[in-house]
Image: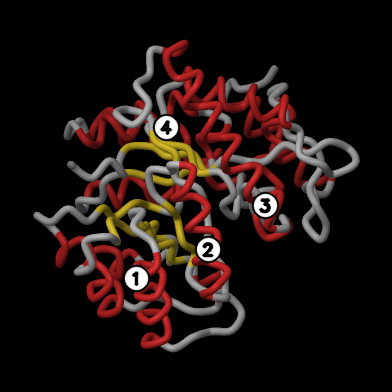
Amino acid sequence: MDNFVSQTFTALITPFKEDLSVDFEGLKKLLDFQLKNGVRGIVPCGTTGESATMDHETHHEVMKFVFDYAKENARKFNRVFGKDLFIMPGVGSNATDEAIELTKFAEKFGAHAALHVTPYYNKPTQEGLKLHFKLITDACKIPIVVYNIPGRTGRNVEVATMLELAKNPQIIGVKEASGDVNQIAKIIQKTRGTNFSVMSGDDQLTYLVMAMGGKGVISVASNIIPDKMSQFTNAMLKGDYKTALDMHYKLLDLFDVQFIETNPGPVKYMASLMGLPAGPMRPPMTLPIPANQEKIRKVMKDSGLIQ
């Protein structure tokens, strides 16, 4: 099977009620919005989904709910589940045994792949990172995508380590959010012609990453502009760089403002302005301060997303 990790995958927000329980009716509306607007994949329970404040029971419930709902409703939106629509839940942990447990659960209900943020806080060595992923792939058969975001985890997956991981046929790609374009280029250079997908982990770097040979983006912005992000990455994959570059510059202010504070606060606020279910954030995360809310509203008005 060709590697399906390409185009736009949405790092989906998790809508909460005022009591901070999961708003599953709201989640249905978010999924309808995504399925209607052409994204190739959905990533529940990632950083943007506030997985860090979910206990394991909630984590299980949300990722299985997303999978089941997408599977049951794909046809309503002329989508073919498992052919042009894929579910890749976030299942990473800083404890390898917890990561294995979450991965086994995702594998059991049929997830197409699993996104693994590298272990955070405890700062394993490069050898420790390799051991972490070896133990996961030894214990589970589901395809794995590594998520490298050293700004959150405190540890970068170095190029040599990533290339070693890429030799494992079960590790099918990386979400690269190091912000280091040279590092990303080296990974692409050494994996060209293989079945390994390099995906941008930063919306604002997607044009550069894909121009260098990356396959797409795991996107925050596609929570609110799934149609535009799908058009953008499809243009890049077709080699229509001029159309994509025009889109990149039209969307750049939006990309920037969604990180005016720690993700996913800004994008949840953006979603709420558009009438999409979002709700509050679970502490210690918060929605943007009023001054930043005003900046967000201005960019969204200028972009034509709100009046």
Nearest to the observer: residue 177 or residue 104: 104
Q: Mark 4 falls on what kind of element?
A: helix
Q: As shown in the figure, which amino acid type bears the numbered disc 1?
A: Asp
Q: Which amino acid does label 3 sit on?
A: Glu
Q: Mark 3 points at which residue?
A: 50
Q: Vertically, is 220 above or below 250?
A: below
Mark 2, residue position: 92
Marks 1 and 2, Cα distance to the nearest angstrom?
A: 16 Å
Mark toward the start of the polypeptide (3 vs 2)? 3
* Residue under the point 48% across and 28% down: 226
Q: How crowded is mark 2: few (under 14 residues within 10 Å), some or many (20 or more)?
A: many
Q: Where is residue 269 in the image (x, y as percent from the top left)?
A: 73, 38
The Cα atoms of the two marked residues, 3 and 2, are separated by 12 Å
For this orientation, the residue located farthest to the right is 19
Q: Crowding at label 4, few (<14), some or many (≥20) Cα neighbours within 10 Å?
A: many
Q: Where is residue 24 in the image (x, y as percent from the top left)?
A: 72, 31
Horizontal side, residue 156 vs residue 94: left or right: left
Label 1: which secondary element:
helix
The image shows residue 181, relative to residue 211, as above or below, that is below
Circle number at residue 138: 1
Amino acid type for the residue under numbered disc 4: Met
Please name the residue that numbered disc 4 is placed on: 229
Distance from disc 1 to disc 3, alpha carbons, whole Å, reads 28 Å
Q: Give neighbour class at mark 1: few <14, some 14-19, many 20+ (Cα, 10 Å).
A: few
User: Mark 1 touching mark 3, by CB under 8 A?
Assistant: no
* Front: mark 4 or 3: 3
Give whichever of discs 1 and 2 has the lower sequence position: 2
